[in-house]
Amino acid sequence: MSGTIDYGNLMHRAMRGLIQEVLESVQESGLPGAHHFFITFDTNHPDASLADWLKQRYPSEMTVVLQHWYDNLEVGDEGFGITLNFGDAPENLFIPYDAIQTFVDPSVEFGLRFEKQMTDVEDEDDDASEEPDPKPAADVVSLDSFRKH
């Protein structure tokens, strides 16, 4: 066992759980009031699923908006599936929570940003040949870019 508490990883899991809980509520009851979400995710995440043409158009990251029209929101423990409309072309997506880079609800000026950073990881097998894994950290995101001027 490590001699320190990994607050960054604990915060990461807590913030992903918050996103899951919010999306579960939307799955059950729809978006309340003026709430809507901008969700940016890593399209290269191995568990992310999106149409080939979307992957080609957004080779590293993509921002989706849950607001006026979405369908088939299915929230699970590892991520969520949703159908969104791209220029009158409905497409199914699966977005793992670990692929999310930002989650913003501009209606209430709430946002989270997850950044990858390198940390030392102790391997239980003491295999020193493995590289350290990137561990995301959660930060509150600046909402200035989403403000209407």
Image (cartoon, grey):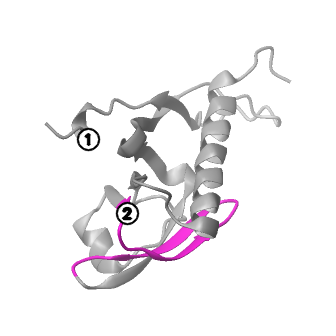
Answer with mark 1 or mark 2, whichever residue precedes in sequence: 2
Residue that lies at the very extreme toward the right in this rendered image: 1
Position of residue 112 measured from the top left corner of the image (x, y, whole percent): 46, 37
Position of residue 104 measured from the top left corner of the image (x, y, whole percent): 41, 44
Q: Quadrant of the C terminus?
A: top left
Q: Quadrant of residue 92?
A: bottom left
> Taking 22 as reference, is 86 left or right?
left
Nearer to us in this view, 68 or 12: 68
Q: Is residue 80 magenta?
A: yes
What numbered label is drawn on residue 67?
2
Disc 2 marks a residue whose amino acid type is Gln
Q: Residue at x 37, y 63 (%)?
A: 67
Position of residue 143 measured from the top left corner of the image (x, y, whole percent): 32, 33
Position of residue 70 measured from the top left corner of the image (x, y, whole percent): 42, 74
* In the depicted structure, whether residue 10 falls above or below residue 43: above
Q: Quadrant of residue 10?
A: top right
What numbered label is drawn on residue 111?
none
Can the viewer see residue 144? yes
Q: Quadrant of residue 83?
A: bottom left
Q: Residue at x 60, y 39 (%)?
A: 15
Q: Badge 2 local density, few (<14 within 10 Å), some, or many (20+)?
A: few
Q: Which residues are magenta?
A: 65-87
- Please give the residue where the numbered disc 1 appears in the rendered image: 146
**Dot 1 lies on which element?**
helix
Nearer to us in this view, 55 or 18: 18
